[in-house]
Image (tube, rainbow, N blue to C red):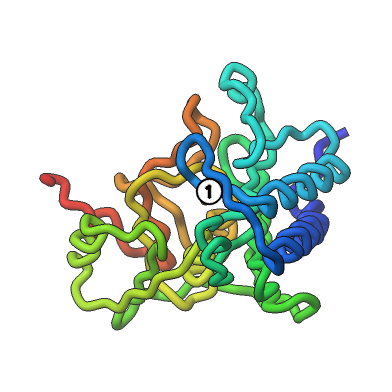
Amino acid sequence: MSAPRPQAWLDDVCAIAREAAGAILAIYAQDFEVIQKADASPVTAADLAAQKVIAQGLQAIAPGVPVISEEALAAPWAERRTWRRYWLVDPLDGTREFVKRNGEFTVNIALIEDHRAVLGVVLAPVTGDLYAAAQGHGAWREATPGAPREAIHTRRANGLLRVTGSRSHAGVRAATLLGRLGEHETFALGSSLKFCVIARGDADVYLRLGATSEWDTAAAQCVLEEAGGAVLDLAGRPFRYNTRDSLINPEFIACGDTSIDWAARLIDPDA
């Protein structure tokens, strides 16, 4: 019996994401403790509550498919390197934004097959804004729970470029590279919502310098690619997952208009 196609799981994964969002919001409405992990990143009870909901939900719909998650110990590389299909999850992407209570955090659930993100769901719990995609089936947005699903597409990068970036991780080097684009407007946004505004045609590019993890990008990469965009390393190569021991991503460019060589425009090869 062949394994289900990613599209067959998409509605179930959306429902799991909404259930996880409910668990997050129950804690968001209260006073909560913030704990520093070993890498100095914050974690709250909301991260752990969402992790539990998602792990149980994915096990129910896809028994035996392994899960890598920010809030669970990853399997060793000797085991992971044999996986062809697995879930890649960030139960609460943007914990810093959660702690600041600005609403710019998400639930990210992706399915990886042969090193590519083939299903992605990104949900902003506070607004209910949900983005979803499966390989070969396009990307769509459900702006609020129960709203009609609207197909989304990236835009051509004509005229004044709109550049989105991190609210918590901006830097001088990124500003210097973005200056090579010429005149542009910038706006900050938390979590993987930066990919989503590009996917829906409201921004053109997001340059991320510094460390991110594979669970930070996979779900949103699927959404952006199915909407017509791309996530590329600084050499212009598409992102792939679970190709080495480390789960840390290279620096990257998320873009909407793939007819532009963004790496060439942004990166000085002699620098």
Q: Quadrant of residue 258?
A: bottom left
In the picture, measured across the screen, residue 267 lies left or right of residue 10, that is left
**Residue 195 to residue 187: above or below:** above
In the picture, measured across the screen, residue 183 lies left or right of residue 62, that is left
Mark 1: which secondary structure?
strand
In the picture, measured across the screen, residue 27 lies left or right of residue 57, that is left
Q: Circle 1 sits on which residue?
A: 42
Viewer-nearest residue: 218 or 21: 21
Q: Quadrant of the N terminus?
A: top right
The residue at the point 23 percent across, 63 percent down is 175
How crowded pointer 1 is (Cα within 10 Å; few <14, some 14-19, many 20+) is rated as: some
**Residue 67 to residue 265: above or below:** above
Counting from the top left corner in percent of width and height, residue 142 is at 70, 74
Q: Exactly how many numbered labels are in the figure?
A: 1
For the residue marked with disc 1, what is the amino acid?
Answer: Pro
The residue at the point 41 percent across, 65 percent down is 167
The residue at the point 53 percent across, 48 percent down is 42
- Given the current orientation, which residue lies at the most extreme left position? 270
Q: Is residue 119 visible?
A: no
Viewer-nearest residue: 3 or 81: 81
The residue at the point 32 percent across, 63 percent down is 260
Counting from the top left corner in percent of width and height, residue 27 is at 72, 61
- Given the current orientation, which residue lies at the most extreme top position? 78
Q: Is residue 175 visible?
A: yes
Counting from the top left corner in percent of width and height, residue 150 is at 68, 77
Counting from the top left corner in percent of width and height, residue 231 is at 44, 53
